[in-house]
Image (spheres, rainbow, N blue to C red):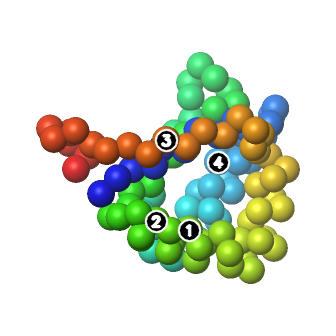
Amino acid sequence: MFFELREYRIKDGKRSQWVKLMEEKIIPFQVSKGMVAVASFTAMDEPDLYVWIRRFESEEEAERLSKDVYESEYWKKEIKPEADGMLDREKMRVLRLEATPKSVIQ
């Protein structure tokens, strides 16, 4: 099992709109495809930062679910165009993490 921590920088003044998109469309859609969204956060001291965490059982699962989500017509036609207007994709950061043995997130 591993976690994927995704850090996004949101364009000026669009963070509340981004959170709404994540909570109403992106996360529910990804969960409907089988992804596990562990948590999402906004940074108190950085008004353009949004962070979320997903969990995968294996690399194979991550690849399969990513294909199901990002290659779908709904993603390409509905979600991506809206997201592209809010995200600074050049500043996006994705970390793959393994929980340590005593981590409560296991």
Q: Which residue is mark 1?
A: 66
- Give the residue type that dot 3 points to: Leu
Q: Secondary structure at mark 3?
A: strand
**Residue 62 got which mark?**
2
Q: Secondary structure at mark 2?
A: helix
In the visual, does 82 lie left or right of 100?
Answer: right
Residue sitting at x 77%, y 62%? 80
Vertical placement of residue 3 versus 76, above or below? above
Residue 93 picture location, percent across and down: 60, 39
- Give the residue type that dot 1 points to: Ser
Quote the CA–CA distance across marks 2 and 1: 6 Å
Please state which of the two labelled residues, at mark 1 or mark 4, is closer to the viewer: 1
Q: Secondary structure at mark 1?
A: helix
Quote the CA–CA distance across marks 2 and 4: 23 Å
Quote the CA–CA distance across marks 1 and 4: 21 Å
Q: Are marks 3 and 2 in contact (CB under 8 Å)?
A: no
